[in-house]
Image (cartoon, grey):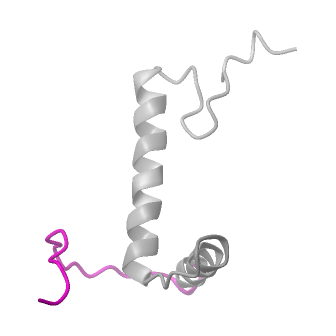
Amino acid sequence: MGRRRGEIKETVTIRLTPRARQMVTDIKRYFQRGFSGKMYTNSLAIEQSIGHYYKSIKAMHESQGTWCGCCGQSRNMDKRK
């Protein structure tokens, strides 16, 4: 009985500047306001942010920098008017 086991996680220690710490707190607040009232932890906020950054950089790398990995817009300035 009880809760199902989740994904195995590795414990790491990171050092954050006061500004970065405030950003993590803000991200947690945004998540809690926008999604179903679920309680988010610092670890979850940082993990999701890393996942978003990873997908963005991966998409930009695969397109060889011609597309923005975050919004999908063309980064070719010559074709923009």
Q: Residue at x 88, y 14 (%)?
A: 81
Q: Quadrant of the N terminus?
A: bottom left
Most distant residue in the bottom direction: 2
Residue 8 position (above or below residue 2): above
Q: Position of residue 56 (x, y in %)?
A: 49, 41
| Residue 35: quarter of image | bottom right
Where is residue 11 shown, x and y percent of the image? Answer: 19, 79
Range of residues picked out in magenta: 1-19
Magenta stretch contains residue 29: no
Residue at x-position 42% and y-position 71%: 46
Instruction: In the rendered view, tell whether residue 66 sits above or below residue 40.
Output: above
Residue projecting furthest to the front: 1
Judge whether residue 15 is colored magenta.
yes
Q: With 69 as the anchor, is 5 left or right in this view?
A: left
> What residue sits 43% from the left and 82% below the top?
42
Is 73 placed above or below 80 here?
Answer: below
| 51 relative to 21 in the view: left or right | left
Residue in the image at 37% along x and 82% along y: 15
The percent position of residue 58, horizontal first and vertical second, equals 40, 36
